[in-house]
Image (spheres, grey):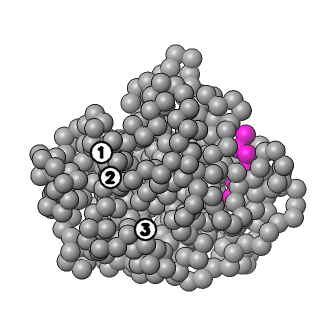
Amino acid sequence: MRKLRLVGTVLGTTLVLTATAPVAQADTRPASMASASSSNKGKLDDAALNSGLRAIHDAGMYGIYSSVRDGSQRWTGAAGVADVDTRRPVRPGMLHRVGSVSKAFTSVALLQQVERGRLRLDAPIGDYLPHLVPGERGREITVRMLLNHTSGIGDYIAGAFPSLAHGSTASLDENRFRSIRPEELVRLGLAAPATGKPGEKWSYSNTNYVIAGLLLEKLTGQDAEAYITRHVIARAGLHHTSFPRTPYIQGPHARMYDSFYGLNNPPRDYSDYDMSWAYTAGALVSTTDDLNRFYRALLGGELIGPAALREMQRTVPTGGGANYGLGIYSVDIRGCGRFWGHDGAVFGAGTLVYSSPDGKRQLAMGWNLMKYERLKSDGTGFEDSPIDDALNRQVVRALCPATPPADSHSATAPPRTVLPTVDLAPGTWAEGLR
């Protein structure tokens, strides 16, 4: 069984601001070089951050782009290729599918309903959606359990893409342009084996956040994606974040490749995809600058008030080094402190966002090759990946400049799990959205 490993996908299922930050200008240097800009010299070490991105690319990642902030200082960079055929380079500011980073946006929208008195976090979901989650489950599962992944409801990914459970990616290709209703995703999740009794333990399930989106629609009388766009995305001042209207990303973006642990050789391009299968659990498109801006707004009290933010930051242990709240989680980096954020993973695209509690120190990264890891020959887990090592070192380099990002195998190195992944059932390949 695969547990949380901060890199690759933190919570693996394959998740915050208002001041306007300039978007990085296009870089004309070769694809093998990182590009960067910073508002001024100081705590941010441009050369080290550039070198870190190049190391990730050199380790085997096709392309990676990142934004780092320290107070008023800002750095953006990119390294590698956006298209393996044309060798078109990646650029800072590219649009990107952010996967489960979307969950924070959905959670914020529901917490706004709590503030308006329309929703109680500890009320049974059956009080609001009795026909969607009927019977005993509807009476025992609370809204809070959905948002912190303790509901015990299974994930719909294996049901939506059945070939994954049989070691094949055929259903990913067959369903590339399929539109699937959120109610059908919930049906598949409820039909999946339960991961525990309601409230018993943490177990990541995208079904929880599809139900959350349908709950938002019930409470507001609006389309969930439209509500989040108006009351979360626009309120945070995000100009490059949206729910996709078509299977195609409109604007500069990298192609997105997935190896599926070697099933796809070479890795297959999943850039063009109908994201209805992810809905409010993970369909957002954004940029690294916008994601940092969102977390500044969230942690700075611009999207929800202090009481709601405290509820969002009430966590349960994941058993993998992180503590999960309501659509966000905390991770402690040794010698550096606590950071809040989320990771995301969809077919071909990975994302990571971390922010200090005061929103002053921030990192957002996106990359365009997924499930590059290889299974051990005995099937008990994954071989160590140089990409994971390089990603972890970059996280420490960006967030903890006083902590040397030593080799991950050294005695003084920070823990390998600086980045959290999805908890897969043994023998399945159903990791799609984190």
Q: Earlier in the sequence, mark 3 or mark 1?
A: 1
User: Which residue is the site of mark 1?
Assistant: 187
Tell which residue pokes out farthest to the bottom in this image: 19
Task: Give the residue drawn at x 70%, y 51%.
Answer: 255
Q: Magenta stretch? A: 60-66
**Of the pair 352 and 118, the residue shown nearer to us:** 118
Residue 193: image x %, image y %? 28, 33
Toward which corner of the image does residue 409 lie, by quadrant? top right
Q: CA distance from mark 3 to mark 1?
A: 20 Å
Measure the alpha-carbon separation of dots 1 and 2.
6 Å
The residue at 32%/43% (across/down) is: 189
**For the residues bearing labels 1 and 2, Cβ distance under 8 angstroms:** yes
Q: Relative to 302, does residue 87 appear above or below in the rendering?
A: above
Are discs 3 and 1 less than 8 Å apart at CB?
A: no
Amino acid beneath label 2: Glu
Disc 2 versus disc 3: distance between alpha carbons? 15 Å
Mark 1 residue type: Arg
Q: Nearer the viewer, residue 73 or 425?
A: 425
Q: Is residue 162 magenta?
A: no
